[in-house]
Amino acid sequence: MTVTYACPVCHADSRAELDRLSDASPPEQIAARLRFATCPRCGQRNPAGLAGDDVWGRYTRVIMLGMAGFLAATTWLFPVPGAALTGVALIVPHVVGMALRKKAGEPMAPGGLFTALHFGAALVAAAFFWPRAVVVGALAAFLVPLAQREVAQRAAWERGRVDVRWLPEVAAAPAPPTPPAG
């Protein structure tokens, strides 16, 4: 599908082709695909995507820090159930993400799910031998992804770069010759 992208920074219009969208796609879906676009003329990122990164980053930090604190406290007070709860909390986002990818027709990536399953099982096993040390695992389970948020943001912009194929500009018709003065 071919669309026109109006850069909010330099105000230039550029034509782009969006893969996997038809002419009947809703405007919200088109806007979502252009959210992480980088203007081919000025090289600036779409401000809507940058603003969304900031808002999403604040929500992510608050939720992840809250989860880490809650699960660390639960694991400190009740080591085995707390470790099991941490394992479940690690698995649920991967299962939901795989379901959303399947619904969107994108390939599923079960690697993260298997890693979360193994980490959760290791936490539960460690809770039997080192009950208080499992708190470190519960904290790491949520603080490490928080530190890796920059990688996820970079991946969204990379997907935007790949999904949006900029078309070459059509050269304007030559101006008619001007009559000689005289």
Image (cartoon, rainbow, N blue to C red):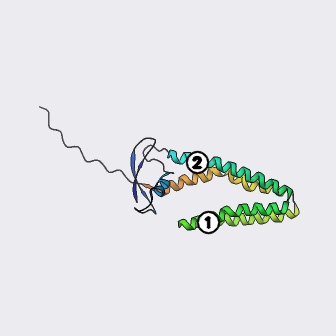
Tag 1 secondary structure: helix
Q: Residues within 10 Å of mark 2 (few under 14, many from 20)?
A: some
Residue at the limit of the structure toward the left, as seen here: 182
Q: Residue at x 79, y 57 (%)?
A: 137
Q: Left or right of 79: which side holds 59?
A: left
Q: Are marks 2 and 1 in contact (CB under 8 Å)?
A: no
Could you tell me which secondary element the residue under label 2 belongs to?
helix
Closest to the observer, 122 or 54: 54
Q: Which mark is residue 135?
A: none
The type of residue carrying mark 1 is: Met
Q: Which residue is mark 1?
A: 98
Q: Which residue is mark 2?
A: 53
Side of 76 relative to 165 (left or right): right
Q: Residue furthest top?
A: 182
| CA distance separating discs 2 and 1 | 22 Å
The mark nearer the N terminus, 2 or 1, is 2
- Look at the image and tell me whether residue 106 can be seen: no
Residue 94 in picture, x, y percent from top left: 66, 63
Q: Quadrant of the N terminus?
A: bottom left
Q: Quadrant of residue 122?
A: bottom right
Q: Which quadrant, please, contains the C terminus?
A: top left
Q: What x and y, as percent, mark residue 29?
A: 48, 58
Q: What percent of the width, then of the height, locates residue 89?
A: 72, 61
- The answer to which quarter of the image holds residue 165 is bottom left
Residue type at numbered disc 2? Asp
Q: Position of residue 30 (x, y in %)?
A: 46, 56
Residue in front for this viewpoint, 76 or 117: 76
- Residue 82 left/right relative to 169: right
